[in-house]
Image: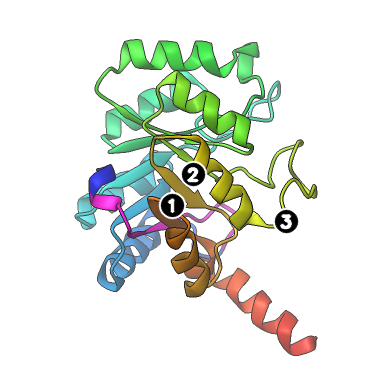
Amino acid sequence: MLAEMKGGLVVSCQALEDEPLHGAEIMKRMADAAKRGGAVAIRANGVEDIRAIKDYVNLPVIGIIKREYDDSFVYITPTLKEVEELVEVGVDLIAVDATDRLRPGGLDLAAFMKELKMRFPNQKWMADCSTLEECIVAEQLGFDCVGTTMHGYTEKTVGKKLYSNDFEFLKAVVAAVKVPVIAEGNVITPEMAAKVLKYGAHSVVVGGAITRPQQITARFVEAIIG
């Protein structure tokens, strides 16, 4: 799957329950539109959406399950339960939160990944990271690729200028690891997508800028109002 993604655009087709486009029927059509536009893969959330997309669109799927637990800030594929659901539905690549935060039940990433690789030795894994150090650790733990997904969305990185911009963070990650680096997060224009590939990203994931019309509309309105 990673070979198929190289140099290409992955479209994240997700809509949460409180969003107007929520629902598997809509998401499968969104994925179809992405494929027709040239996407090389789809990132999707939840078994229902993933199953509908896989039945409707012949593209590789990066699967996640967003689920919140009271004892942890980790919500992207946080426990074995979510992984089992994703394996059952047959996703090509499973993405999990690979930050240094403890998972539900107080489990750390190293212990979690050790169990996953033992139970599902043939599964491919993507690490959603927020810092350079987390990307390096993820590679050491055996993830097949690392993503910049969580940069700016964790307690350590939200609102903090660790780098001058997201491109500098990406370049630092590319220089530090040997596994493919997936650029994801805050890529909102075609020019930005092309730029991250130029900086060495294996592929780029774009979500809200393509699949969330309320966010797109808000950016237009903000620009108009000034």
Q: Is residue 52 left or right of residue 177?
A: left
Residue 63, compared with residue 54, is above or below; it is above
Q: Is residue 54 magenta?
A: no
Identity, as a three-letter code, of the amino acid under mark 1: Ala
Residue 120, compared with residue 167, is above or below; it is above
Q: Depth check: 107 or 160 in front?
A: 160
Residue 195, image x and y in percent? 49, 66
Provide the residue designation for mark 2.
174
For the residues labelled 3 and 1, the Cα–Cα distance comes to 18 Å
Under tag 3, what secondary structure?
loop
* Crowd class of label 3 (few under 14; some 14 to 19; many from 20; radius 10 Å): few
Provide the residue designation for mark 3.
164
**Going from the N terminus, do you reach mark 2 or mark 3 first?**
3
Q: Is residue 96 left or right of residue 75?
A: left
For the residues labelled 2 and 1, the Cα–Cα distance comes to 7 Å
Can you see residue 193?
Answer: yes
**Going from the N terminus, do you reach mark 2 or mark 1 first?**
2
Provide the residue designation for mark 1.
201
* Crowd class of label 1 (few under 14; some 14 to 19; many from 20; radius 10 Å): many
Identity, as a three-letter code, of the amino acid under mark 3: Ser
For the residues labelled 2 and 3, the Cα–Cα distance comes to 16 Å
Residue 200, image x and y in percent? 43, 53
Can you see residue 78?
Answer: no
Give, as a single range, the part of the protein colored magenta.
Answer: 4-19
Residue 213, compared with residue 199, is above or below; it is below
User: Would you identify the image quadrant in which residue 94 lies?
Assistant: top left
